[in-house]
Image (tube, grey):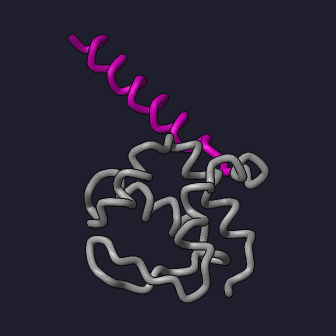
């Protein structure tokens, strides 16, 4: 029983280590940001679904903030149907790449 427990603990550490190895690559992002540009790339844009609101410009935002926001949309912790759909289609690497790309942009 102790061996099984030890293996489970080691597997948990290995999984945590592999998740920490994800590094965003801004050069890999252009093919992944097409869904973002339609709202987040238009200064002063207001979305009307599910209600009217000012869409935030995310250029220059912290990469960690963007990654965390995308993960929260994916999990349903943040509520917005369009963002949940987009975030649900992204892998952790995709999120890191998109976050790296936008963090290197200038805030407008």
Total labels: the figure holds 0
- Residue plotted at (39% across, 46% down): 88
Vertical arrangement, residue 88 with respect to residue 13, above or below:
below
- Residue plotted at (69% across, 47% down): 31
In screen coordinates, is 51 left or right of 36? left
Work out which quarter of the rendered image holds the C terminus and state it.
bottom right
In screen coordinates, is 50 left or right of 63? left
In screen coordinates, is 11 left or right of 8? right
Q: In the image, residue 11 lies at what x, y percent?
A: 41, 23
- Residue plotted at (62% across, 73% down): 41
Q: Residue furthest front?
A: 48
Q: Which residues are magenta?
A: 1-24
Based on the picture, tell me whether residue 36 belongs to the magenta stretch. Answer: no
Work out which quarter of the rendered image holds the N terminus and state it.
top left
Provide the major secondary structure of the magenta segment.
Answer: helix
Q: In the image, residue 68 lies at what x, y percent?
A: 45, 62
Q: Nearer the viewer, residue 87 or 81?
A: 81
Q: Residue furthest left?
A: 1
Q: In the image, residue 63 lies at what x, y percent?
A: 60, 65
- Residue plotted at (58% across, 45% down): 94
Q: In the image, residue 80 lies at what x, y percent?
A: 30, 66
Q: Nearer the viewer, residue 108 or 41?
A: 41
Based on the picture, tell me whether residue 2 belongs to the magenta stretch. Answer: yes
Q: Residue furthest right?
A: 27
Q: Nearer the viewer, residue 100 or 88?
A: 88
Vertical arrangement, residue 86 with respect to residue 101, above or below:
above
């Amino acid at each position: 029983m102790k061996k099984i427990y030890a293996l489970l603990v080691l597997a948990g550490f290995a999984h945590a280590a592999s998740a920490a190895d994800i590094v965003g690559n801004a050069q890999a992002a252009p093919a992944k940001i097409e869904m973002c540009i339609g709202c987040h790339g238009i200064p002063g844009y207001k979305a009307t679904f599910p209600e009217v609101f000012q869409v935030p410009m995310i250029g220059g935002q912290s990469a960690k903030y963007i990654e965390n926001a995308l993960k929260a949309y994916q999990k349903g912790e943040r509520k917005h149907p369009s963002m949940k759909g987009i975030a649900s289609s992204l892998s952790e690497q995709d999120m890191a790449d998109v976050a790296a790309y936008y963090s290197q942009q200038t805030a407008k």
